[in-house]
Image (cartoon, rainbow, N blue to C red):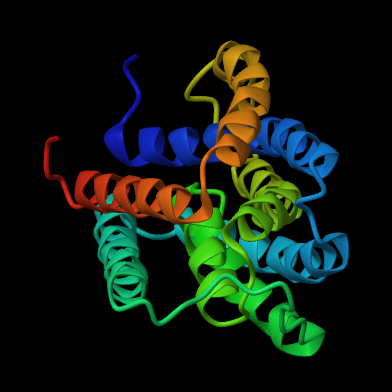
Amino acid sequence: MGVLPDTAIKIAIGTNLLVILATAISGALGHNKRGAVRWKVALGLGLCGLAGAWVGATLAVRLPGETLRVGFGALVLAVALWMALNTALNLTRERGKTKENLPVLCLCGFPIGMITGLTGIGGGIVAVPMLVLAFGFPMHLAVGTSMAMIIFSSLGGVIGYMVNGVGISALPYSVGYVNLPIWLCLAATSVPMAQLGAKVAHALPAKQLRYVFIAIMVCVGLKMLGVVL
């Protein structure tokens, strides 16, 4: 579209975060209908994640796009390996009682938000393994709570990319690094599909859902590192 690559990656991230915001609202409502959102945890993680995402977005507009991609790809693959090993060795069991240490969860929300702002990924790809492995959340509850958290963290990122992109006019109908026509095209299908995703997630047993999640993490990590799948 005639946009310089370093600017294009920032527009892609900023616009994607607005898509994620709309999608997360839809997905969270779908999971909430099935009783799979712990809102107290989501708010604690999300509000701290909002601040972290704003900081991450501010840093991202000053960093080379290649640095963002490679760093996040390596992080996602490491977390996928951590989750896969725990699953294979049966070190994590689905438990009805979770460890809801809100101060610790809030502290975790800030770096997850920073990852959101830096990479344009909603943060669930880190939050779900954390809730399952470190806080004993059942897989379905972790996915639903993470989706609700993403509403806030993605909002912080959107604000960051809008504010830090003031004066950028690479594409028409943009607010900073957020392009509204592209957002509308993507959100038009992602919002209803989030409802379908919530339905499918709850139709799968927890262990199978975990395998699906690990596979997605590996694919995302490899693509960020430039491996074509």
184 relative position to 99: left or right = left
Q: Nearer the viewer, residue 47 or 62?
A: 47
**Residue shown at the point (86%, 60%) measured from the top left:** 39
Q: Percent position (x, y) of residue 96?
A: 71, 72
Image position of 56 with respect to 171: above or below: below
Q: Percent position (x, y) of residue 56?
A: 55, 63
Image position of 166 with respect to 180: above or below: below
213 relative position to 84: left or right = right
Q: Percent position (x, y) of residue 86?
A: 35, 76
Image position of 94 with respect to 36: above or below: below
- Residue 28 occupies quadrant: top right
Which quarter of the rendering shows the N terminus? top left
Query: Total number of numbered labels?
Result: 0
Q: Percent position (x, y) of residue 120?
A: 50, 47
Q: Nearer the viewer, residue 205 or 223?
A: 205
**Residue shown at the point (64%, 30%) measured from the top left:** 199
